Amino acid sequence: MASATDTARAEPSEASEDLTVRRRLIRFGGSRLGGLILVLNLISLLILLGGALALNEWRTGLVETRQASLLGQAELLSKVLSDEDYTRGEPIPELNPSQSAKVLIDRFVPAGQRARIFDRDGVLIADSFDVSDTIEGQPLPAARPAGTPEPEEDTDERTAANLERANIDLGDEILAALAGDPQTTVRRSENGERVVSVSLPIRHVQQVLGVLTLEANDVDQILDAQRRALIPFALVALGVNLLASLLLHLFVARPVMRLSAAADQVRLQRARAISLPDLEERRDEIGDLARSLESMTDTLSTRMDAIERFAADVSHEIKNPLTSIRSALETLDLVKDQDKRDRLTAVLQQDVRRLDRLITDISNASRLDAELSRDRPRPIDLAALLTDIVSIYETTGKPGEAPVTLDLHPDTLARVMGRDGPLGQVFRNLIDNARSFSPAGKDVRVSVARDDADALPLRIVVEDDGPGIPPENLETVFERFYTSRPRGAAFGSNSGLGLSIVRQIVEAHGGLVSAANRVDASGAVLGARFEVALPAVGRRL
């Protein structure tokens, strides 16, 4: 049966659930594409961060290492200069300028370093630049073409300012060293270069004879080398970012553009569906989007086909009573017999009622989708709803109409999440359909049962004692405008939309509806049986 098939489809298999869990474990945050982008960006950021940290640590370590190296050299030279061979004067010794300068010649001062000796008054008495063949200088600027005006900046004034600043800084350092405290500083030289400087007092016993200053001006060159060493890190990070951008473009931007173009094509060319097989095979969000768009357009296409068929069926069904009414009106003026005129009038009244019923059902069917989407589902007590509906039939029933009975156990918990208006219409349509087929003296029975072992535990059954349903029409009775009736039944009493509305509402509530015949032990049909299966809210204790 269709209900069993649909129920099986509604129950996810354990294998599909396990596959879903494994896919979620593989992905980062539920997104494989998002995980790829996240990893690439993190690698890029880590590369830049690692390079920056390495550069900062290198720079700090470089200055500290240079200061420690200069301090060791200065201590060695200061011990040599404090020897009696390099001092003069009794009883108050002082540094011997010529002997001190000789120390700078005999004691090798590495390239890139400068050694200077100051006496106790802070006067320069020896400079390694003066006693060596090394002449410090800077490359000349590029030659200017003829006629090029002089630059606005005054180079001589800038050099003088640098020299003045360097002399002030060096003077402060010398004064602090003459007070007896070793000094390690980082300052600017006369040429504006960064200089690591160490100044140590030269002592003879406890008396300060002067100051030895060692400078290293290769810090900027080493830092430039460090910056050049950072370039590979930056290039690698740039390459990773470019790769991430390219992947985003190829795997996200271009597919989205293709989906947008396909959607525009559906709109402009009035196509019915989107089909991009290469995107639908992807196992990321773009593939999910492509499959969702195709499913959506297929659903819309199916809905449009259903609307077109519905419009055609409506046109056909309305034409039948209109044709009958027109024929009766054309014949009415020609008939002189009053009995025949009364019969024609009765036919007109019956066709008008049939047309009114048909238009009402068509209006209800056309508004059904809007009503289902507009109302918010809430817990509905089916026991109370069915009790109210059956009581209305009991109070409004006319002689000769089939009575309606309700079999409901008082302890049955029959609550469903839904909309009371459409659900009430479901049971009214089923009861009306059963009453229209019930013979005189027979009743229509409504029962409610619950079985929590089923996926759809609530079962509402409507039974009658009518002629039943042909076996080949157990499914077609739920199609629109199905009006096949047994011999002797009143023609035009049904529009053929009631059961199709029932199925549409029940499926919108996540349930199933099915039709079957009641048979006895010999196989004889006793009547029709309609069963509505709905999901329940809350479990029965």
Image (spheres, helix red, strand yellow):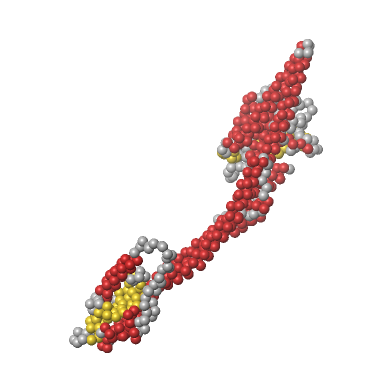
Q: Can you say which quadrant of the picture contains the N terminus?
A: top right
Residue 367: x, y in percent? 63, 32
Question: Viewer-proximal residue, 168 or 149?
Answer: 149
Most distant residue in the bottom direction: 85
Question: Viewer-proximal residue, 65 or 157?
Answer: 157
Q: Using the rendered view, name the quadrant where residue 178 is placed.
A: bottom left
Most distant residue in the right direction: 522
Q: Can you say which quadrant of the picture contains the C terminus?
A: top right
Question: Looking at the image, which residue is at 50% across and 62% down?
Answer: 45
Most distant residue in the left direction: 91
Question: Looking at the image, which residue is at 77% across and 16% down?
Answer: 331
Q: Using the rendered view, name the quadrant where residue 388 is placed.
A: top right
330 to 385, vertically: above or below:
above
Question: Looking at the image, which residue is at 63% across and 49% down?
Answer: 258
Question: Looking at the image, which residue is at 57% across and 36% down?
Answer: 375
Question: Viewer-proximal residue, 66 or 143?
Answer: 143
163 to 442, vertically: above or below:
below
Q: In the image, 337: left or right of 32?
A: right
Q: In the image, 5: left or right of 129?
A: right
Query: Would you say residue 150 is visible in this rendering?
Result: yes
Question: Viewer-proximal residue, 23 or 213?
Answer: 213
Residue 455: x, y in percent? 65, 46
Residue 353: x, y in percent? 69, 22
233 to 291, vertically: above or below:
below
Count all numbered tags in the image, as a single digit: 0
Query: Would you say residue 61 is visible in this rendering?
Result: no
Residue 285: x, y in percent? 60, 52
58 to 239, vertically: above or below:
below
